[in-house]
Image (cartoon, rainbow, N blue to C red):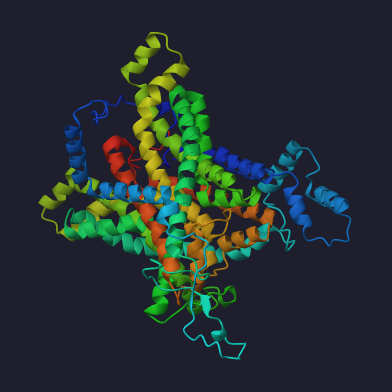
Amino acid sequence: MRQYFIHRLMLNVPVVFLVVTLVFLMGHARPDFAEQRAAQGLSSTQDYEAAIKAIRHELGTDRPLWEQYGVYLRDTFTGDFGTSFITHHSVTSELGDRLAPSVELGALQIAIALAISIPIGIISAVRQDSWMDYVLRLLAVVGLAIPSFFLGTLLLLFATKLAGWTPPLVPTAYRELWEDPAANLKMMLLPALAGGFAQAAVIMRLLRSELLDVLRQDYVRTAWSKGLAERAVVARHVLRNALGPVVTVLGLMIGILFGGNVVLESMFAIPGAGQFLVISLRQNDFPVVQGVVLIIATALVTTNLIVDLSYGWLDPRIRYGRAA
Amino acid sequence: MSGQASGASTIGHELPVLSQPDTGAGERLDTRGAARKLLRLAVRKPLGTLGVAIIAALALVAVTAPIASRYAPDESFTRRNPGFDPTSTDYYRTDRNEFVLDAKSAPSMDHWLGTDDAGRDIWSRIVWGTRRSLGIGVAALAVSLTIGAALGIVSGYFGGLIDTVMQRFMDALQAFPALLILILAASAFELTLRNLVLALGFVGIAQVSRLVRGKVLSIRAMPFIEAGRVIGASDLRLMVFHILPNTAGTIIVVFTMGLGTVILAEASLSFLALTPPGVSWGQMLNSGRNFINSSPWQAVFSGLAITLAVLAFNLAGDALRDVLDPRLRV
């Protein structure tokens, strides 16, 4: 186990390193771009050239590229992700306030996705090729194709037309979960459903094919022939063995959710990391965009590592010694 | 799953995969036989056939956009003002205008899908959006396929250290949610159509190279590659003339499935207004949300267009995979 752990960890170091380098290179794709954007806020009476020079010195972009890269690496790995052009606060502290809503939204989406997909996946697999199976599979196929922001729009439309209810769509209406749970969940409901449905389709399809695999195993036949009830066979013998790949996908899904929630958070005025990213982008606040992307990417690589490890823990047949 | 990267040490133990039965590309039967074969395939894969049919319709609409659209996408329509009163002296009321903007009208014979807030024909804009979505999608995939296939073939063919390094690099690319790379690119580069296509293409490289590499690993183990090497063919020759043609099935599948993904990504970006200006589905959906309660037509129809296109490519891709390269199941 320890050997496997170290092996996976070593594999992830270059990945993080490459991500950091990629973000650095993107930042230097257009020379002077960041400086010009930073200088946009200057009043016109100031000497433009001198101002640019001062900013360049402050940002350190007057130094050679490799030196900047060194400084950048040092800063990044010591947790300094830069300073916002607009608020002049550090990106880390700006982002810190906005992580809770994003994490909450992601958790709600995964909970909804699991609550929908696990029963549906089981029904679809156990009643394979029945009309119910076909209907559920068709729903999943459509669910995969619907963009979450369209689903969100439709939910908004239905909520207004059918239920006569519209969630507050202004960021000032947002309250943290521990401050005012009702107000919080009111705003979270629709984006959580929109994101959850889409992921439910992915999980359901995977779970179904895994279940079908397991249902054909010898030990399942043994369980049937022992005279166990269907419920016992499925819940105790089949489901547990089909869940491994689902866990892996859940890990990958966190990344997809983060990406998709950039759109959903902007749509539903949820003041999370995704909305912060879009707002910063519109304000040309480049260090923030870079920093947020970097933090999210690092978090994802770490999550994937944890998932890889838990996969082995859930299914002891996985041999850790084998090169993964 | 793509999360499980196979390291260099497993390559040597890769079992040679038996060549798949010929799917009919090689045999030149009479046309009736071929047609019957196609028909049988269509019956066996009804959903895939539906997907292909939708793709064909979308492609037709995209190609014939100037005719199919009926109106120019930016033409503002007006309608006769029912309350028009030329004798009115009240300058503050619109009653003095004989024509008013035909905005947010419901679907009718004149405007099949209604009009938007600026009085423009939604059908026309959806049609031009089809051309844009498909165009950007095909161009972006051409980029991913060219680079991704080249990297995948080199990586799989040589194996060893090259393979390991390349696969780690692809890991890094895939660890990033695609939308985040695209947002980063939108902040770092100018918003032009060329940059958009390059960014979308770049995002797809990792997936393409992974799948192509997997295919190359099994091709490499086949006797004809060994035979080629025995008669003195160079590595380059083997890769270009012997391995590349054999990855065609994989590439077709990756292309079809990838188009759905790219169209979705482009729609997300244009929904966030991070694409160069132009008529696009994502942007229509986004602006349609502003008046969704008074006139849902624009938001609903543009959203349906995105869904339909993605659905069609997913269905066709699934079916093509089952037929051409069942091993690709991911």
Labels in figure, total:
0
**Where, by quadrant of the figure, is residue B111 drawn?**
bottom left
Above or below, B83 relative to B188: below
Asked if residue A87 shows in the view, the reply is yes
Residue nearest the viewer, comparing B49 with B173: B49
Above or below, A137 relative to B252: below
Q: Which residue is drawn at 45% across and 64% down?
A: B122
Give coordinates of residue B270: x percent, y percent.
Answer: 53, 57
Q: Residue at x 57, y 85 (%)?
A: B96
Quarter of the image with the N terminus of chain B in it: top left
Q: Residue at x 14, y 47 (%)?
A: A222
Give coordinates of residue B207: x percent, y percent.
Answer: 45, 40
Above or below, B241 relative to A201: above
Asked if residue A110 shows in the view, the reply is no
Give coordinates of residue B321: x percent, y percent.
Answer: 31, 40
Please state if A62 lies on the left or on the right of A295 as rendered.
right
Residue at the outermost top position? B231
Residue nearest the viewer, comparing A1 with A89: A89
Give coordinates of residue B320: x percent, y percent.
Answer: 30, 40
Quarter of the image with the C terminus of chain B in it: top left
Please state if B55 lies on the left or on the right of B275 as rendered.
left
Q: Which residue is drawn at 78% across and 61% down?
A: A41
Residue nearest the viewer, comparing A37 with A131: A37
